Amino acid sequence: MTCQGEKRGGSPAGAELPLLTDADVAAYAAAVGDHNPLHVDPVFARRSPYGRRVAHGALAATLALSTAERVQLDAVREIEVTFRQPVLPGIRYRVDPVPAAGGFGLRTSFGDVRVLDVRCRTGSPPPVSSPRASVPLTIPIPGEARVLDPAALARIGSEEGSYAADAVGLAGLLARFSAREIPPHLAVLLAWASYWTGMCVPGRDALLIGVTAKVHSASAGVVGFRTRPPAADLRTGLTTVRAELSGGVGAEVTLQSVLRRQIPAAAPDEMAALLPPSPRLAGRTLLVVGGGRGLGAAIATGLAGQGATVLVGCIGSTERLDRALRDYGDRLKPVTADAGEPAALAAAISAVLADEPLDGLVLTAGPAIPAMPVAAQAVEPAIDFITASLRLVLCPVTTAGPRLRRGSPVVITSSQAVADPPRHWPHYVAAKTAVEGFAAYLAAHHPWRILVTRPARLRTDLTNTPLGHPAAAPVAPTAAAVVEAIVTAIQSADPLPRKVTFV
């Protein structure tokens, strides 16, 4: 796959789409004005549930439409797009026609994983729109996406203004994927939906899940819009925006998105309520890999509350530990390095610890978990995921292992998914099964106490999705149980069990 501007060939319905790259995603962002960091900022995207930059849903929907016949697209009077899974660069997706009353439907999928659905109702081609002059936006859009919490969202009223995509850049990008063209007004309608959701309302923390539109007229040029006050469900984060478009496309549009919650780390007082502070680990030093967020951050906080000095292994910011750092700043020491790179991790540990030994190692880091089928096109992504998962266990063990005292606890994080496999997580189940096998090897052949924890799905950045968050459990109880097991292991005078202990 290339993104150097050459034709990639048409993609008839019932065929695989060409691969998207990060460069393609950046080009779409530039053409439509949706610079949401989930699409363009690798650092921000890495902390999302997807672990990397994702493609705009509107781009994926536009590419799906390009597989239909132009005569069908010219006759579209109503369109409904439902986004079910993120579209990731480097994954090969397939578009298939599906029955739709009064028109046609298209389904984009990855094996048996449904990614997005498009349903169109057709009729006579829409009449030509009247041109529209540019109108300033009621509230000017900043250069970065708005950051709105539910309270701020509730204060937003009607807004109006003008929108114009880079028609040349957008046409050029789409031409690299398909020899077929789609009507400009449909491409611009989806572009505006992406722009408004990702940059304006709900803004930075939005996940677009649906677009519906009734098309009244079509032409080219500037699009005028007027949005009504958004309707937001404070419990679920579901946000609905209704708008009227005119000019380049005349349409009634409804946008549905989910405002992602901010997931704080377990605070010291939350951990203290479950595990009262004590000096039981005073004088002990432990390394928590993946300690910058989620379960790792909660365990690091709990260990510090028991008097331990904790090296917090993380790849970036420790902002999720801000409250813990205020309470235990002398006991929490960031070790900034990629846990999958042994040399970098060793250097970062040495910079903090010099030649001192470790009294324990906690491994909680893991890659983001995309949905995957058991299918030919998922083989390489699945192998990559399993490899990444194993690296985040093997590399820290081989790097920190020589520093561990005899009998030190080594905590390896597995998952209940091993015993109860989720439908589209075969790669995750395989990775955690392999990790548990490695834990059994360590228990048999190394002088450490090997503890394996199999938590249920926890409420962390990796599960902060519309479906993942409601089904997830709070982190603190699991973290407290792990900390208590570590204390017990360090204080134990019993011989090494030479087998895995499940926490």
Image (cartoon, rainbow, N blue to C red):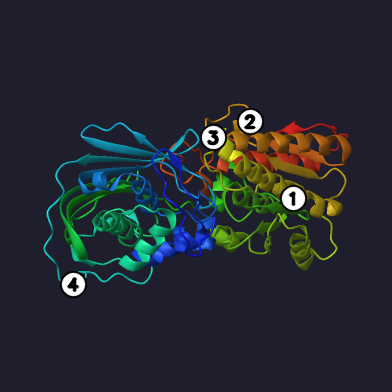
Q: Give the mark nearer the N terminus: 1 vs 4.
A: 4
Q: What residue type is labelled 4?
A: Ser
Please give the name of the residue rendered at 40% of the width and 63% of the height, measured from the top-left corner: 29
Q: Alpha-carbon distance for marks 1 and 3? A: 45 Å
* Crowd band around label 2 with a 10 angstrom C-alpha radius: few (<14), some (14–19), many (20+): some
Tell me the quarter of the picture where residue 282 sits: bottom right
Label of residue 418 in the image: 2
Do we see residue 146 in this rendering?
no
Q: Is mark 4 on a helix, strand or loop?
A: loop
Q: What element carries label 1?
A: loop
Residue 155 image offset from top left, x and y in percent: 24, 59
Q: Alpha-carbon distance for marks 2 and 4? A: 57 Å
Q: Which amino acid does label 1 sit on?
A: Leu
* Crowd band around label 4 with a 10 angstrom C-alpha radius: few (<14), some (14–19), many (20+): some
* Crowd band around label 3 with a 10 angstrom C-alpha radius: few (<14), some (14–19), many (20+): some
Do we see residue 445 in this rendering?
yes
The C terminus is located in which quarter?
Answer: top right
Q: Name the residue under label 1.
A: 281
Q: Is residue 109 rendered to the left or right of residue 46?
A: left
Q: What element carries label 2?
A: helix
